[in-house]
Image (tube, rainbow, N blue to C red):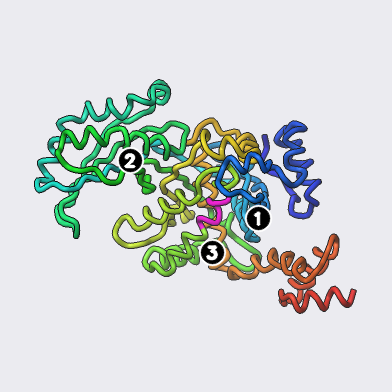
Amino acid sequence: MDSRVSGMRDMQPAERLAVLARVAEMDSADRQLLAGPGALPLGTADGMIENVVGTFELPMGVATNFQVNGRDVLVPMVVEEPSVVAAASFMAKLVRSSGGFLTSSTKPLMRAQVQMVGMTDPHGVRHAVLTHREEIIAMANSKDKVLVGLGGGCQDLEVHVFEHTPRGPMVVVHLIVDVRDAMGANTVNTMAEMVAPLLERISGASVRLRILSNLADLRLARAAVTLSPEQLSTAQYRGEEVIEGILDAYTFAAVDPYRAATHNKGIMNGIDPVIVATGNDWRAVEAGAHAYAARSGRYTSLTHWEKNRAGHLVGTIELPMPVGLVGGATKTHPLARWALRLMQVGSAQELGEIVAAVGLAQNLAAMRALSTEGIQRGHMALHARNIALLAGAEGEQVQRVAQALVAERNVSVDRAKELLQAA
């Protein structure tokens, strides 16, 4: 599959679907799934959450040009914000000429936390728990032979002691669980529940919370990219200038949490749409990402940007990536299943790596824009279509009015209405 699909921005939705069907070799069932509204049957939705009264749709686009570890990937993105899909696609196009995105990841390890209270000897409790390590791990694995058979299951445990809290001493046991291709919440929660009575017998303490941690700092995805000054040159700016501007923009985010919050939000602009499209838990990914950004005790950038000896820009990202291919909406939502087929991913780790690459691309797009013409120029050009729709434009009027708004640099509903009335 070749992810380089040019001109999609100028096509109608039906034309884009036809091109996508050809490039991705989609069958008629998948084409029909995307062709009309209502891809999620009401009966299926009713089984997914409670009190269902209907379904709610968001735009679904496809980011093109991505090459990850030498493999071309078309990336589905569900998002309402203009410029996100276009920015990711454009950055992926720039990056291709230097080898695309290089990624890696750790094993899919999640943490289950078991909170223990009511002791006066927390370090003694820690020692008792560690003494029974093998018994606790065996108990955790006793109810999930399938996961263990796949090479997963509880692998280890940690014991964290909090000697002084407002509620007295506290000991928290972490079960370290390889969840394979699942996101893993249900698995680790079940294991925490399973070992709770054993921990109480071992320690004499009382167990309170038994729940996963969304700070999945043992389940990391990474992506890296290198770009030359020539790749970053524009009609108005030399590539060397662009690199210096990007480095200044990154440093601002690295040192200032107020800037870092917006900087990282831009990264999640790329990450969240892929998580949503594949039926994964974007709240878990968001929580883990922002907690990881503050792991040093100070909130900072999720990415790092620097210049190598050749004067090339080098960007990297590392963040928790608790995503799955099995369980939950990844299996029940028809479009989530299609999204995973489109990406042709073979494991949850591979999915996480692609998602990290999209986040890095989105961050590069934002900083390149900020350090050159400013973020609003490109964003407002795409936002003009929304303004035209809001003013009442239909069909071919949408593009015509949007182009006029951009040309006049007056992207407003009032001006769009004036243009429609004058037509």
User: Disc 1 residue type?
Assistant: Ala
Residue wearing tag 1: 86
Range shown magenta: 267-273
Rendering coords of residue 198 (x, y %): 22, 32
User: Can you name the residue that lies furthest to the front here?
Assistant: 51
Real-space Cα distance between discs 2 and 3? 44 Å
- State whether residue 46 is above or below residue 202: below
Q: Residue at x 57, y 42 (%)?
A: 48
Residue wearing tag 3: 242
Rendering coords of residue 208 (x, y %): 26, 46
- Looking at the image, tell me whether mark 2 or mark 1 is earlier in sequence order: 1
- Looking at the image, tell me whether mark 2 or mark 3 is earlier in sequence order: 2
* Residue 132 is a magenta residue: no
Q: Nearer the viewer, mark 3 or mark 1?
A: 1
Residue wearing tag 2: 112
User: Disc 3 residue type?
Assistant: Val
Rendering coords of residue 338 (x, y %): 65, 37
Assign the magenta stretch its main secondary structure: helix
Q: Residue at x 53, y 68 (%)?
A: 371
